Image (cartoon, helix red, strand yellow):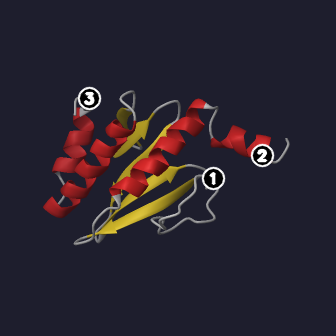
Amino acid sequence: MSYKADPRVDAYIDALPEWQQRICHEVRELMHEADPEVVETVKRTVQPYFMLDGNICALLAARLHVNVFLYDGAIVPDPEGIITAGHDNKTARTVAVREGETLNAPALLTMVRQIIANNRAGGWRKLKAQESGQ
């Protein structure tokens, strides 16, 4: 896949153990597969973010897992149950992937495409306000 890679994202991923690199590369490819206009950047000094008309997701490697933070305001359906934390979080939910686990790429791709559609429609905050009649 062809996209503009941010060298700071490369540096973040390259510094990780091999198993975390694999997960991060897979997530990165999925973000760009979801929409060719997705932009990658670094926020909070080192954390990779993927954006299109707002935040889509961020990566954060921890000692025992990689967190994929999905910025969806908890409005994107999760029929496959890939969300592992933040179920009631008002901003982002987490998909944690541990060493030896396989990322459910099709489910994540579906959710990311919905987040992008929501961002293009004004973002999850606007959509939640419309839903509640505000």
Check the image and name the residue furthest to the right.
Answer: 133
Asked whether the residues under the numbered discs 2 and 1 touch, taking CB atoms below 8 Å apart as contact, a structural biologist would say yes
What residue is shown with label 1? 75
* The C terminus, quarter of image: top right
* Helix, strand or loop for disc 1: loop
Q: Is residue 45 visible?
A: no
In terms of image quadrants, where is residue 66?
Answer: bottom left
Q: CA distance from mark 2 to mark 3?
A: 35 Å
What residue is shown with label 2? 131
Q: Amino acid at mark 2?
A: Glu
Q: Amino acid at mark 1?
A: Ile
* The N terminus, quarter of image: top left
Describe residue 122's horizontal placement relative to residue 32 as left or right. right
Q: Nearer the viewer, residue 45 or 21?
A: 21
* Helix, strand or loop for disc 2: helix
Picture residue at 62% right of the left edge, 51% below the top: 73
Label 2 environment density (alpha carbons within 10 Å; few <14, some 14–19, many ≥20): few
In percent of width and height, residue 86 lies at 55, 65
Picture residue at 18% right of the left edge, 63% below the top: 19
Describe residue 108's horizontal placement relative to residue 20 as left or right. right
In percent of width and height, residue 31 lies at 36, 42
What residue is shown with label 3? 3
Describe residue 29's horizontal placement relative to residue 91 as left or right. left
Q: Nearer the viewer, residue 105 or 41?
A: 105
Q: Nearer the viewer, residue 99 or 78?
A: 78
